[in-house]
Image (cartoon, grey):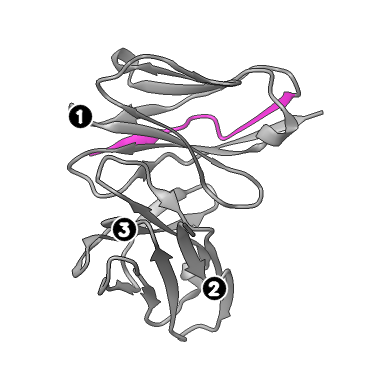
Amino acid sequence: AQKVTQAQTEISVVEKEDVTLDCVYETRDTTYYLFWYKQPPSGELVFLIRRNSFDEQNEISGRYSWNFQKSTSSFNFTITASQVVDSAVYFCALRTPSGYALNFGKGTSLLVTP
Amino acid sequence: NAGVTQTPKFQVLKTGQSMTLQCAQDMNHEYMSWYRQDPGMGLRLIHYSVGAGITDQGEVPNGYNVSRSTTEDFPLRLLSAAPSQTSVYFCASSRTRSDEQFFGPGTRLTVL
């Protein structure tokens, strides 16, 4: 069975602070894909990143970075120098070749205050 | 490309009424899915399709029907609406099983 756990329900930071959102996954498949999505207050779901299980390189995109560690089954997301526009709910998700859709975590609500 | 479109954006139903939520994509994606989002629950899969004419149940299929007569369209039917179906519904599509899914803007449904 596939499962994604986002233990942090809500996080509140002050602008310019760094913040890390945790994601732990479970799967028996050796090939799988991990994703992060952002859901701003307007409600749409915005794709951020896709990572396959064979690529453990960390990725950086501007202020965003992702740390994928198979040894701990984690795919954590860090926002550096957070901004008010980063306020959103962030979802981690897992997809496997044997599955047909995404398994989502319950999301972490991030509030960045000025 | 319009991407994934959903109509309507908002809908209020009375218990027992039926309706269809529309979803269309113009990216020629084979895989399409319907999710519902409830507070504190994340997104849960209702039904999915791996191509025209092929559909299957997800995690929470009861009370919903789907069909896929064309690659582009994947409507979700509520047969007899219940208050427990009050939720935000998202349609999504992807090119393959391993690709990211692209989501529509969502339909906020309230059942009284």
Q: What residue occupies the far right of the structure in this picture?
A: A114
Q: What residue occupies the far front of the structure in this picture?
A: B1
Q: Chain of mark 2?
A: B
Q: From the image, tell me which residue sits under label 2.
A: B8
Name the disc covering residue A31, or none.
1
Query: For this view, does A81 lie left or right of residue A104?
Result: right
Tell me the residue at 28%/66% (across/down): B71
Query: For this view, does B37 lie left or right of residue B101?
Result: right
Q: Amino acid at mark 3?
A: Asn
The picture places residue B80, in percent across and down from the top left corner, at 40, 82
Q: Secondary structure at mark 3?
A: loop
Tell me the residue at 40%/77% (across/down): B78
For the C terminus of chain B, the image quarter is bottom right
Tell me the residue at 29%/13% (across/down): A71
The picture places residue A14, in percent across and down from the top left corner, at 76, 23
The picture places residue B86, in percent across and down from the top left corner, at 52, 68
| Residue B90 within the segment the image draws in magenta | no
Name above or below for residue A87 compared with residue A69. below
Q: Which residues are magenta?
A: A1-14
Query: For this view, does A54 lie left or right of residue A10?
Result: left
Name above or below for residue A51 compared with residue A101. above
Residue B39 at least partly seen: yes
